[in-house]
Amino acid sequence: MLKPILNDQEKSVLRHLVDGAKHVVVICHQNPDGDAVGSSAAMKLMLQRMGKEVTAIAPNPFPDFLRKIPTAADMLLGDRHHQKIDRALAKADLVMILDFNMIGRMGEPLATKVAATKAKRVMLDHHLDPDTSCEVTISHPEMCSTCEVLLRVMMDMGWADGMTLEEATALYVGFMTDTGNFTYASNRPEIFEAVSFLLTKGIDKDRIYRTVFFSHTEGRFRLMGYLLYEKMEVMEELHTTLMTMTNEERMRFKTKNGATEGFVNMPLEIEGMKLSIFLREDTEKKGLIRVSTRSVDDFPCNELCAEFFNGGGHKNAAGGSLRMTMEEAVEVVHQAVGKYENLLK
Ligand code: 5GP
Ligand code: MN
């Protein structure tokens, strides 16, 4: 049996908030990933099972393969469905905030709208340093995913007993995607106990893997080949790679925003590499460069991103952004890895 993560006080506050709520709004972070959508979907399905009216919102669109997660295709989009979202927030008693640690990461106009409601707020997350503006903050940075946090909360609250196959499937997606199918951030034995529990609910983990990972377009594949062949700079001494992508290049391969998900991980498959950096032009905001970084072992991507890229994140996966041209951003990357050369050489 997994150890409880909630104390009696937390359980009683959470039970009080959920029991008292009729309408619940569930919100994940911008540019939602498998954990964000998986935890939102599982939360929605569970609350519906408990008789609540639930609206799940993603701040902006997410890739098609995540729409196959049960109920995910029904999520409202913060940058499109303004009226439906306003109606849902107007009657919400409770807002569930999933997979992010600062209210601002839901982006505008959503953040302002949520702040203006009278609804109580519960945050479930696994990122470092959560802000403490919610009535309940359940933050577990040691956990692999928000789906793991949610599953453990469900177990502690007695809500996991009636878990459906759909809920278990949605939860598994977060475990699988936030650990790269259990290749990083996944050495805690509790993770596999939790997955074992999901298997008892009937999930077909092999099929979920194919649904999520074998779902790419031809354009994404050719773009990947192009970036790896033409655009990857290998800094051998620093065991670091840098890839860049402009919007023109992305569109040449007819790929949408989100189609480059996972590209940043690939150069780490080159033997000996410690750090991979991926720069891409923002698809909407001109003059904004999005930064993604990934590392192995102890290299602190979060510190690098906080110091040089106006961002943060986890030790082995972090990101940020730069307001400048691609050429200037490449310069910043060279400065940044120069400063960290002692850790990289
Ligand atoms: P990705 O490279 O997949 O966009 O982001 C990886 C991780 O970095 C995210 O899970 C998140 O924790 C963090 N991250 C990405 N962008 C930002 C940012 O702009 N600010 C902060 N604080 N963290 C970010
Ligand atoms: Mn996550």
Image (cartoon, helix red, strand yellow):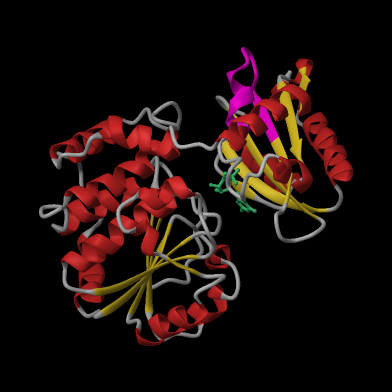
Image-quadrant location for residue 108: bottom right
For this view, does 75 lie left or right of residue 247?
left
Q: Write the residue at 27% across / 33% down.
A: 205
Residues 342 and 114: in front is 114
Furthest residue toward top = 271
Q: Is residue 59 visible?
A: yes
Q: Is residue 212 above or below residue 237?
A: below
Residues 101 and 29: in front is 29
Residue 290 appears at what percent x and percent y? Answer: 71, 49
Q: Is residue 175 magenta?
A: no
- Quarter of the figure that contains the N terminus: top left
Q: How many marks?
A: 0
Q: Is residue 275 magenta?
A: yes
Q: Is residue 125 above or below residue 51?
A: above
Residues 274 and 330: in front is 330
Residue 148 appears at what percent x and percent y? Answer: 32, 45
- Quarter of the figure that contains the C terminus: top right
Image-quadrant location for residue 308: top right
Q: Is residue 98 above or below residue 325?
A: below
For this view, does 101 lie left or right of residue 247?
left
Region in magenta: 264-277
Residue 100 appears at what percent x and percent y? Answer: 49, 57
Q: Write the residue at 21% across / 75% down.
A: 16
For this view, does 246 lie left or right of residue 94?
right
Q: Is residue 5 visible?
A: no
Residue 277 appears at what percent x and percent y? Answer: 70, 34
Q: Write the residue at 58% across / 27% down.
A: 298
For this view, does 133 lie left or right of residue 225?
left
